[in-house]
Image: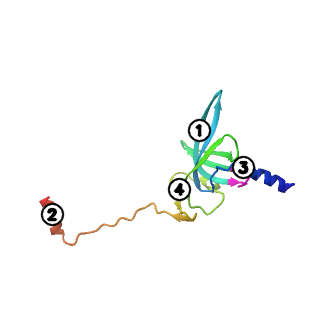
Amino acid sequence: MQGVIDKFSISNAKADIPEIKAGQTVKVYQKIKEGDKERVQIFQGLVIAMHRKKGTSATITVRKDSFGVGVERIFPLSAPFIEKIEVVRQSKVRRAKLFYMRALKGKKARLKNTDIDNNGDDVVVETEQNQETVKPENNNQNIENVKNQ
């Protein structure tokens, strides 16, 4: 009986949802009905947990800080009110559940960003740029060139 339920839930899951992992910053486009009007509201935040990764019961927990207050929402991935999910950024994390992010604020809540290769491997991108200052060999010659211009 469980095998039949698993086959049904996987076959009815949405196909246009990207691969989502903990540590990614995502934009969730959600349809909202107000009276007879319908609009799309965007919720952008950090994925701190994924539950039941496959099938119709798969959900993600997305957290963001709004005016100093932490806001978490749980989105079912196969819900009809989810228009699309867009991955904005991916961070390097070593855990599957990032519940420790709830206690961190400000600069302590930062994560290292990563880029994704064509092979699917994560590559760490350094955010700080190392700038070298090159001194000219002959300072007198450079000063004369500047005066002549």
Q: Is residue 85 above or below residue 146?
A: above
Instruction: Examine the structure image and report whether residue 51 is included in the region drawn in magenta.
Output: yes
The kind of secondary structure element at disc 3 is loop
Left-right relation of 3 to 55: right
Name which residue lies at 30% across and 66% down: 133
- Give the mark nearest the N terminus, 3 or 2: 3
- Quarter holding the N terminus is bottom right
Q: The residue under label 3 is which amino acid type? A: Ala
Alpha carbon distance from label 1 to label 2 = 59 Å
Disc on res. 145: 2
| Proximity of marks 1 and 3: CB atoms separated by less than 8 Å | no
The residue wearing badge 1 is 41
Left-right relation of 50 to 131: right
- Give the mark nearest the N terminus, 1 or 3: 3
Mark 3 burial class by Cα count in 10 Å: few <14, some 14-19, many 20+: some
Mark 1 burial class by Cα count in 10 Å: few <14, some 14-19, many 20+: some
Q: The residue under label 4 is which amino acid type? A: Arg
- Give the mark nearest the N terminus, 4 or 3: 3
Q: Position of residue 120 (x, y in %)?
A: 58, 63
State which region is magenta.
50-59
Alpha carbon distance from label 1 to label 3 = 22 Å
The residue wearing badge 4 is 110
- Give the mark nearest the N terminus, 1 or 2: 1
Disc on res. 13: 3
Alpha carbon distance from label 2 to label 4 = 46 Å
Alpha carbon distance from label 4 to label 3 = 33 Å
Q: Is residue 114 above or below residue 14?
A: below
